[in-house]
């Protein structure tokens, strides 16, 4: 099943609510993923531009998109970035295919 990395950033209001009532957000996300036929691999928090990262397996892009849209609809998330991940084997296959092709470099007229 394809894997996706979903980075998310909470709103200030969401952080304030979590400060008042700390909650494990894996359970609601797990339920959402399973309801749409996907599998939550992990939910981790981090430093930087985003507050956390979800690793998810979903049957296809449409399901992964539906999960992200459903998760952010309540407006407690201010930003997301979803990246479809490729296995080493998939990347090697892409490299083999690309290696059979030639793409012309742009040239200045002149």
Image (cartoon, grey):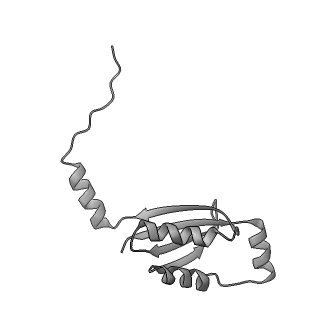
Quarter occupied by the C terminus: top left
The one of 32 and 82 positioned closer to us in this rendering: 32
The percent coordinates of residue 29 (x first, y second) are 57, 80
Q: Quadrant of residue 24?
A: bottom right
Q: Is residue 109 above or below residue 78?
A: above
The residue positioned 78% from the left and 77% from the top of the image is 17
Where residue 4 appears, as percent x and y from the top left, is 45, 68
Work out whether residue 1 or residue 16 is closer to the camera in this orientation and state it: 1
Q: Residue furthest top?
A: 110
Residue 46 visible? The answer is no
Q: Quadrant of residue 31?
A: bottom right
**In this rendering, position of residue 36 left or right of residue 11:** left
In the rendered image, the vertical position of residue 33 relative to residue 83, given as above or below: below
Give the vertical position of 19 relative to 75 (above or below). Answer: below
| Between 44 and 23, the one nearer to me in the picture | 23
The percent position of residue 42, horizontal first and vertical second, equals: 51, 79
Quadrant, the N terminus? bottom left
Is any part of residue 42 visible from this angle? yes
- Residue 35 placement, left or right of 78: left
User: Does residue 85 appear to the left or right of 92 in the view shown?
Assistant: right
């Amino acid at each position: 099943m394809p894997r996706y990395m979903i980075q998310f950033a909470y709103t200030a209001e969401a952080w304030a609510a979590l400060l008042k009532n700390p909650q494990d957000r894996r359970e609601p996300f797990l339920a959402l993923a399973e309801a749409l036929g996907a599998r939550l691999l992990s939910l981790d928090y981090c430093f930087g531009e985003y507050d956390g990262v979800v690793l998810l397996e979903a049957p296809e892009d449409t399901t992964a998109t539906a999960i992200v849209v459903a998760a952010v609809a309540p407006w407690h998330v201010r930003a997301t970035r979803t990246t479809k991940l490729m296995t080493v084997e998939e990347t090697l296959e892409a490299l083999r295919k690309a290696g059979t092709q030639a793409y012309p470099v742009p040239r200045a007229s002149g």
